[in-house]
Amino acid sequence: MKVLLASQAIAGHFNPMTGIGVRLKDEGHDVGWYTGRTFAGKVDELGIRHYPFDRAIEHTADNLNELYPQRASLKGPMAIRFDGERIFASNVTNFFEDIRDVQQRFPFDVVVADNTMFVQRLLAVVLGKPVVSVVPIGNMESDPLVPPMFFGFSPARTPAHKILHAGARLVSDQFVTKPARISYVRQLRGYGLRTDGGKPITDEPYRWSQAIIQTGTASLDFPRRNVNPKVHYVGALLPHRAAGAADTAADEVPDVRRTTAAGTYRRTVVVTQGTVDNRDPAKLMVPTLEALKDTGALIVVATGGAGTGELRRTYPQPNVVIEDFVDFAQVFPVTDVFVTKGGFGGVLLALSHGVPLVTAGLNEGKNDVNARVAYAGVGVNLKTETPSAAAIRSAVDTVLGDPSWRARAEAMGGQFEAEDSVGAAVDVIKAAVASGGTPGTGSGA
């Protein structure tokens, strides 16, 4: 079987697919990967043939504000509106034409695509190829019981909440997501395809894929009225690690495990702002350090490579460990609380180890992730980008002071342990190819 992986050149979209690519290759399948040149070295390390972007604009976590200087000043709905149209929807034709060219050199049998590329319909209808989508974030398919995306809402419990959600959905449809939808519909028409312009673009991968590999667990999603049989929750799809390999920082942080095991510190708190929104440590890292410095807790800070030296000079306390990167797979087994902006990959990794969370993030869809964390009872959602030290201290004390937070996180972690996530994903791909044909859809096809 010839399999083409296709992903955005963004770590949070690329990394969850690496294990799938390696497993397919190890099973004897011929695997290629269409992604940006940013990941050329990593694709080569995996032993997979790389097909770089040609027409497509390469958006990465580091170049967005350089490509679009006006983006830096946008917040909330305006930022989502901009990103949806400019970063995601506008590249659809470029992605498809690149992949069509790749087909001439690598006649693939199936495309395993990052759902945010939104090429599923073109691949299925124009090329007649089965598509399996990988969703590296929470389930994006709309449903009457699921709140509108990008507002950080939990399911409505009262009539007032239902009215609020209805208004927010209208704002989303008519303002926030409309430019992306218009761009997508216009590009489809260039191929003689027509679609319902009122449907959210985020539903398209769920309609036009043969199957959906959905990261996370159903228990971390909101209740749904309509269960899509094509959606397969596979748990945490973690970046591929060669046997015996560890992250660069692992050798620098072994004392975290030894110190905790020796009982020097009663608790371990890990904090990170991720690798995208980490340029201003005052958002989360600094208030967490202010809240917990000189306490009985060991604080492990992963800066993502931003401002590490300055933070070390400012916080020389013996209970503080500050590194560019931390091997979370090694540290989470001895972690009591994870303080995070709400990146979905980090949330899943923490929960896979049964670690409860304190979350504080609104942008890049993190408010929706954090709403799910709070709804599932596995963490405290501070509902802000800039929490105070007092708020973080209170939230950490809340989680540490009530064992039910840990119990719920461990119960969810047991769901991750019960399956081989990569194996489950590969099985979905094989079944999709074996079933043959392209997906049927409902109205609007």
Image: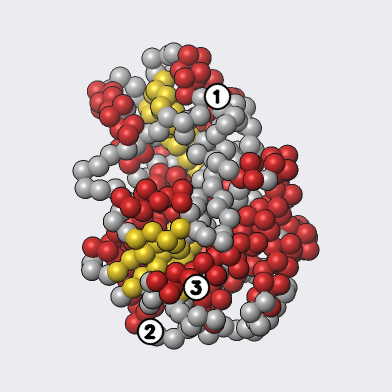
Secondary structure beneath label 2 = helix
- Image quadrant where one finds the C terminus: bottom right
Looking at the image, residue 302 lies above or below residue 158: above
Q: Name the kind of residue labelled 2 in the image.
A: Ser
Q: Which residue is disc 2 drawn over?
A: 435
Instruction: Give 401 or 128, whichever is nearer the viewer.
Output: 128
Residue in view at x 67 percent, y 56 percent: 86
- Location of residue 168 in the rendering, given as x and y in whole percent from the top left corner: 75, 58
Residue 12 visible within the image = no
Q: Taking 434 as reference, is 226 left or right?
A: right
Report the Cα–Cα distance between label 2 and label 1: 52 Å
In this rendering, the label closer to the viewer, 2 or 1: 2
Residue 355 in which image quadrant? top left
- Location of residue 318 in the rendering, given as x and y in whole percent from the top left corner: 38, 14
- Location of residue 300 in the rendering, given as x and y in whole percent from the top left corner: 41, 28
Label located before the other in sequence (3 or 2): 3
Looking at the image, residue 191 lies above or below residue 325: below
Secondary structure beneath label 3 = helix
How packed mark 1 is, by other alpha carbons closer than 10 Å (few <14, some 14-19, many 20 or more), is: some
How is the rendered protein coloured?
Answer: secondary structure
How packed mark 3 is, by other alpha carbons closer than 10 Å (few <14, some 14-19, many 20 or more), is: some
Report the Cα–Cα distance between label 3 and label 2: 23 Å
Report the Cα–Cα distance between label 1 and label 3: 47 Å
Residue 209 visible within the image = yes
Instruction: Give 232 or 120, whichever is nearer the viewer.
Output: 120
Mark 2–mark 1 contact, CB under 8 Å? no
Looking at the image, residue 29 lies above or below residue 360: below
Q: Which residue is disc 3 drawn over?
A: 100
Q: Which residue is disc 1 drawn over?
A: 286
In this rendering, the label closer to the viewer, 1 or 3: 3
